[in-house]
Image (cartoon, rainbow, N blue to C red):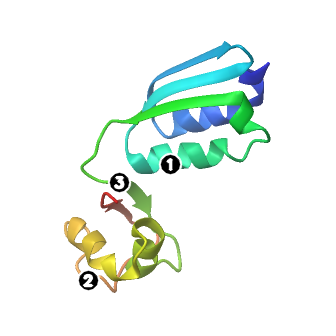
Amino acid sequence: MLKEKYQSLLNYGTSLNMKNVQVTEEAGKLHIKGLAPYAFDKDRFWDKAKTFANWDKEVAINIGVEKTDAYGFYTIQAGDTLSKLAKGHLGDAKRYMEIFNLNTDKLKDPDKIMAGQTIKLPPK
């Protein structure tokens, strides 16, 4: 049964606070529909789905996004910099000030971020 194979993916969706999740199995495919809080959560769900062997033949995913004011939230890890985050999430390290400006309520200096801080990421 496909639902059992993909249970850890469904659990991951729960941990991402996905809403209105509907799971059906039809014609040998697991259909997953739902609503992710942010695009970042949707992308992480897709990334997890792609770790399963034969996912592209066994799963049909239709995930919407609830909020578009930010790409999502990220918890800073040791070794992160805003430039590194901008490169990874926005495709250009020079866009680090977009991240900083979105988080001036938590960050006072773009060069001083701390592991454990949770920040917003701007839309791509």
Q: Residue at x 55, y 43 (%)?
A: 45
Near mark 3 (Cα within 10 A), the count class, few <14, some 14-19 or many ≥20, is many
Give amino acid for label 2.
Asp
Near mark 2 (Cα within 10 A), the count class, few <14, some 14-19 or many ≥20, is few
Residue of label 2: 109
Choose the circle earlier in sequence order: 1 or 2.
1
Residue 42 can be seen in this image: yes
- Place of residue 14 in the rendered image (x, y in percent of width and height, measured from the top left): 53, 33
Q: Quadrant of residue 52?
A: top right
Residue of label 3: 71
2 or 3: mark nearer the eye: 3
Report the quarter where the N terminus lies.
top right
Q: Residue at x 29, y 82 (%)?
A: 110
Position of residue 119 in the picture relative to residue 75 (left or right): left
Near mark 1 (Cα within 10 A), the count class, few <14, some 14-19 or many ≥20, is some
Query: Does dot 2 land on a helix, a strand or a loop?
Result: loop
Residue 116 can be seen in this image: no
Q: Give the vertical position of 5 relative to 101 (above or below).
A: above
Choose the circle earlier in sequence order: 3 or 1.
1
Choose the circle earlier in sequence order: 2 or 3.
3
Q: Is the residue under label 1 in contact with that under label 3 (CB below 8 Å)?
A: no
Q: Which residue is drawn at 50% across and 30% down?
A: 62
Q: Residue at x 48, y 77 (%)?
A: 80
Residue of label 1: 43
1 or 2: mark nearer the eye: 1
